[in-house]
Image (cartoon, grey):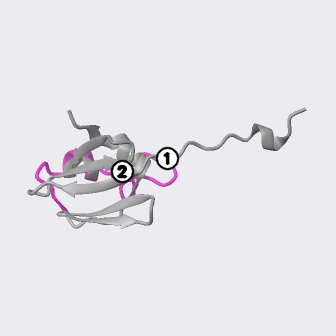
Amino acid sequence: MSSFWDRIKPAPKPVTATDARLSPDAQRLTLTWDDGVQTTATAQVLRQQCPCAACVDEWTNKRTLDPAKVPADLRVLQVQPVGNYALAFVFSDQHNTGIYPWKHLRDITQPQG
C-alpha cells in the first residue's frame, strides 16, 4: 500500500521573469523569462488586464474596468518588483494598485515573433 508521501508529486516550478524592459516611449514592456522566452505587451494591454480590486470585482472576478476607456497611448511610468513573484506598474493615468504575478504576466503577454 502506498503512503501519503509516495503520492505527493513535486509542484512544477512556476516560470519567472528574469528581465523587464520598457520601450523608449514607455508604451511597451518586454519580459525575458527563465525558460528563455521573450514576451511583450503594450501598456494599454497591461492596464486593461490589471488584476486589482478596483479593476476586478473581488467576489465575482468580473472585470469592472471598461477596457475601451484605457487610452492607446498609455505609458508605463514605473516598473517595480514585488517580492520574487510579481511586478507592479505605475501608469500614466496614475493607476498603480495592480500586482501582476508572473503567471498572469505570462498569460497576458505575447511571445515576440
Of callouts 2 and 1, the N-terminal one: 1
Q: Residue furthest right?
A: 1
Instruction: Give the left or right position of residue 25, taking residue 11 as reference.
Output: left
- Name the quarter where the N terminus is drawn: top right
Instruction: Say which residue appears at 21% left-offset and 45% top-offset.
Output: 68
Q: Position of residue 6 (x, y in %)?
A: 79, 39
The amino acid marked with disc number 2 is Thr
Q: Which mark is residue 14?
A: 1
Give the numbered dot on residue 103: none
Amino acid, disc 1: Pro
Q: Residues within 10 Å of mark 2 (few under 14, many from 20)?
A: few
Q: Is residue 53 visible?
A: no
In-front residue for pair 112/26: 112
**Residue 12 seen in render:** yes
Main secondary structure of the magenta stretch: loop
Q: Quadrant of residue 36?
A: top left
Residue plotted at (29% across, 55% down)? 19
Residue 50 on image: x %, y %: 34, 53
Q: Looking at the picture, does residue 45 appear above or below residue 90?
A: above
Task: Identify residue for label 2.
Answer: 64
Secondary structure under the numbered disc 2 in the rendered image: loop
Q: Is residue 58 above or below residue 92?
A: above
Q: Quadrant of the C terminus?
A: top left
Res 9 → quadrant: top right
Q: Where are the magenta residues, as a range?
A: 47-76
**Distance between the Cα atoms at labels 2 and 1?**
28 Å
Q: In the image, 52: left or right of 44?
A: right
